[in-house]
Image (cartoon, helix red, strand yellow):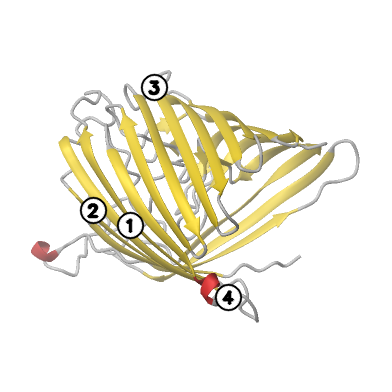
Amino acid sequence: SQGINRAKPVNERNGYREEWAHGAQLNFSSGFTQGTVGVGADAFAYGGVKLDSGRGRVGNGLLPISNNRTADAEVPDNYGQIGGAVKLRASSTELKYGEMRPTAPVFATGDSRLLPETATGFQISSSEFDALSFEAGHFTSINRRNSTNSDDDLTSEYAEVEARSVDFAGLSYAVNDDLSLMFYASEAKDVWRQYFANLNYNIPLTDSQALNFDLVAYKTRDEGEARAGELDTLTWSLKGAYSIGAHKLSLAYQKVRGDEFFDYIGGDSIWLANSVQYSDFNAPNERSVQIRYDLNMKHYGVPGLTFMARYIKGDDIDGTKADPNGAFAGWAGDDEKHWERDLEARYVFQEGAAKDLSLRLRHATHRSTAFDDDLDEVRLIIEYPLSIL
């Protein structure tokens, strides 16, 4: 285990992990040259510096680790990457090639640690019609959140199988100001084909009250060489939220219909309601429910201060019928269950020299039967965006 605390006796080791680092991101996006087809460029430079960590405490995904991936794994004092993309624009259609951060629901690079992931490939986006937008992409490699290699394999988050490439295309349609629809199709070459649909409906009740419903569904089937084994899952979630003034109460239900885990490539390629700080609640046949409460202190004279609390419970897990020759064989037994509780406090400075400085404290507790880990996690996140140009 990467997280074993080697300073403790064997009988007291408990998977303790601790990493503290400082990161800096510099992003540049040019305009376009004049003419029928405009030309431009995007560029970035990301760097991370280790402030504290060491053998026996690594493995949170914040810092790169040496290849042995054991308790003796070492982390470098600093790491980073530089990259960019060229872009062409005609009317309201844009084509990009290079390293970028796609945000499609079937392929989205993650940004949940010190430095964001990037992916290398082509992407085209178009919004020629006011209410309808289109995007498509072809990607061949990824730079993981704790890696310095821009040509890392496109491996799935759970099965860790490699796709030769990822292709996707999707449409987004705003029916009106309160109703929107999305549909995407994707292929992880020799792993799976995946389809995504989303309906989001907002119902204003009064000036200070509203209801919102968000329905998300993914259909996944194995493709080509089927490197993760046989896959046939339908995973969906429905979330309802009621907001009144400073308060918002949300309820969500999520279900996996299939004998394998719902898997994805790219850290943010999951839009399911019960994908939270630690767990995605995506085990075979799992059903999960969530209750969440948000409080915005702006309504009480403290703009920038927000709080969040949520609790998710998952059960009815049965992984005994997974493909015996597939990547998920033996991952989960019958009648497995788990729960997670997340707490968050955040403050964003509203004025002065520290304007837009964000302080966020997050705490997660996860408890599970044998198929997953028990975890207590604290994250302190400080962000300070600066606009140079």
Residue beneath label 3, please? 222
Q: Quick check: 245 above or below 264?
A: below
Residue beneath label 4, please? 349
Secondary structure at numbered mark 1: loop
Residue beneath label 2, please? 1
Secondary structure at numbered mark 4: loop
Alpha carbon distance from label 4 to label 2: 39 Å
Amino acid identity at mark 1 = Gly
Residue 368: x and y in percent read 20, 49
164 sits to left or right of 124 = left
Closer to viewer: mark 4 or mark 2 = 4
Closer to viewer: mark 4 or mark 1 = 4
User: Is label 2 in contact with label 1 (beta carbons under 8 Å)?
Assistant: yes
Residue 115: x and y in percent read 51, 58
Alpha carbon distance from label 4 to label 1: 32 Å
1 sits to left or right of 64 = left
What's the residue at 31%, 34% (across, down)? 261
181 sits to left or right of 235 = right
State the residue lying farthest toward the front: 206
Going from N to C along the chain, the mark reached first, 3 or 4, is: 3
What's the residue at 19%, 70% (across, down)? 7
Closer to viewer: mark 3 or mark 1 = 3
Closer to viewer: mark 2 or mark 3 = 3
Residue 178: x and y in percent read 61, 43
- For residue 59, the mark is 1
